[in-house]
Image (cartoon, helix red, strand yellow):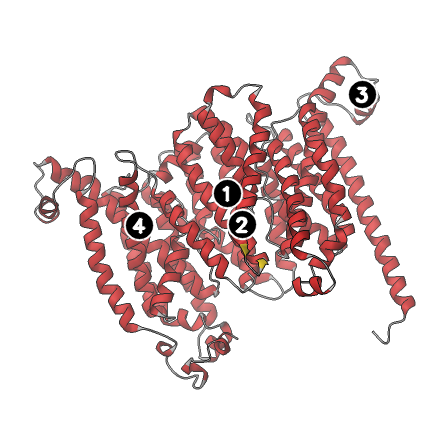
Amino acid sequence: MKLSESSDSPAQSNHNQPPTQFHSRPWAASLILTAGLALLAFGIALSLSFGAASIKLEEVWNAVFHFNPELQNHQIIWEIRLPRILGGVLIGVCFAVAGAIMQGMTRNPLADSGLLGLNSGASLTMAICFALFPGTSFLQLMLYSFVGAALAVVMVYGTSAISKSGITPVRLVLAGAAVTALLSALGDTISLYFNVGQDLAFWYAGGLSGTKWVQLGIVVPWVVAAFIGALMLSRSITLLSLGDEIALSLGQRTGMVKVAGMILVLILAGAAVSLVGSIGFVGLIIPHITRKLVGVDYRWIIPCSAIMGALLIVFADLAARMINAPEETPVGVLIALIGVPFFLYLARKERRAL
Amino acid sequence: MSNVTNGAIAKASHRKKIHDWVVVIILLVLLVAAFTISANTGTIRLSPMELFSTLFGQGTPQQELILFEFRLPRMVISILIGAGLAVSGCIMQGVSRNSLADPGILGINAGAGLMVMLFVLLFPSMQTMNSLFLLPALALIGSGAAAILIYALSYKKGEGISPTRLLLSGIGVAAGISAAMIIMTLKLTPESYTFVANWLAGSIWGSNWKFVMALLPWLIVLLPFAYYKANVMNVLNLGDQTASGLGTPIEKERILLLAAAVGLASSSVSVSGGIGFVGLVAPHLARKLVGPKHKMLLVTCALVGALLVLVADTITRALPLQKEIPTGLIVAIIGAPYFLYLLSRSKG
């Protein structure tokens, strides 16, 4: 059992202790939240001022808070850079929180929305829209990608759930791999057949730079709602992360929590994929680092993951624009360049069998 | 075991043997049936009678041209790569003791794909006939390099290779390579993009006898080698401690077997493109049919793989579409639901 591994856990002696007692470090979490927000503001400011036209921080401030439509620099910041950067913040939050919820609920250190097929489900519906309904509006694209992500979840969970020995982490990863293979094969078939493959690749790779206020306006309410939902669910997720039996014995309705958590995950992943395509590894890396820093209480992990995810994307995007300026490196590629070594490091440490 | 006599054990193992041979014979019959149907599929139809008369040199010149120059090489290649990829997956799963392992997941396809992408990017004008023979060689180099990298990354001093680490390193390297390929995708011309996308999705494009000849030596050497090592794989399946307790030089055998698996997968992938699902599904299905002992398992596995790719390729030719869908996609579309079904039925 999970608890017996951590002999210093106070929970072992007293099962009725609130979950904050399991190696939680609220002070570290508070520090991350405050310092993270400050760093994020700095990153956003830096990112706003950097670009083809270099704009001074002072002017950035004016453009944001005293917008003057007559000035070209103000236009650049307000119409091009700000939506892009806010989009980055948003998808960072989405992928990281989705990853944190999944890792907590499935007790699988390698769970992320890419691995469990959600991203490929959302991408499939995007391919269908691009191929068959070229005029689809962004709101519809986003709603369809929820449907696609949900399709993947139903398939992955359905397969694991109807099996004789129930849902295990191994089964979930296997089902995720198979569903990913199936859905991306269907997506590839459609995009090859209708010749929209490269359009889709451009859409995904250039997603962040193409972000517009309209899109943000559509995505933000969903993400905010899902984030609040995640915070409300965070205590239950902490209990689930200790194992179904413990959660049940503490009076959790585990089935309900899992369904609610999954709905949140697919809103978050679907929204992010519809905005920028499938960016892997954010949902894998961030929750790991966060857990290392703040302990195992998801009431801290979820908000801290959100901040750290946003930080990762904002600075990765900044770096992606600097590396080969004025040309842009897709931010997903840069994240993968950070993510792969991290993943390999985790893989070297991983002792349990999958 | 005290209440089971030796006679009963012998009887049970005899029954198991008969069962296994029945399975193999049924698979062979299915393969012949699929072969007949496949030879029949296409714009110009050949009835089974015409097919056999053509095979034995009694057909019209037109029938001979269609069968020997177009359909037969492609079908033979489907069968060969199906067997090669399936056995490669079977070895990888056996060696890593992990049912998730397959050549696609272990980065072989990604390594080969990267080289193909690089080639198309650097020499866009060379997509002519002579480059078609360069591509398999490049793919082989790419997949070999990826395999060595993955092995090095999952090696730990004193511990050797752990199955889980091997798998995870493979997933990581594959993801890194895919990221690198995204950058290149954006720089391709639409024509090159279509070529690469088709290649990656696994379309059997090397459909003439020269490719059969290029592929055959690998399979002739490596398939019997795998069969010869079946007992070693049985022992490795017992776990590292038991295996070394039985006197098996684990690390050496593992490297040999992995090298064989990489050779099988990359030679197949070099002709077929990134067909990914055969190596995952075929061993699972074969294990369902004949159990975990590797001698029968490898034979069954090769047959299942060959059948799967042949059927998938026949479907791509039978579909009434203006454009051909890559075989690898059909394999995934057939294979994945079946895999999910298997998963839902399995225990533990």
Report, in whole angstroms, how far the alpha carbon at label 1 lies from the one at label 4.
25 Å
Tag 2: amino acid: Ala
- Residue A303 appears at what percent x and percent y? 30, 63
| Badge 4: chain ID | A
SS at badge 2: helix
Q: Are marks 2 and 4 on the same chain?
A: no
**Closer to us: mark 2 or mark 4?**
2
Instruction: Confirm or deny contact between disc 2 and disc 1 (CB under 8 A).
Output: no
Q: Is residue B269 left or right of residue B305?
A: left
| Badge 2: chain ID | B
In the foreground, B172 or A189: B172
Q: Which residue is mark 3?
A: B54
Residue A313: image tag: 4
| Badge 3: chain ID | B
What residue lies at 65% left-to-right and 60% top-to-bottom? Answer: B346
Q: Which residue is mark 2?
A: B152
**Closer to us: mark 3 or mark 2?**
2
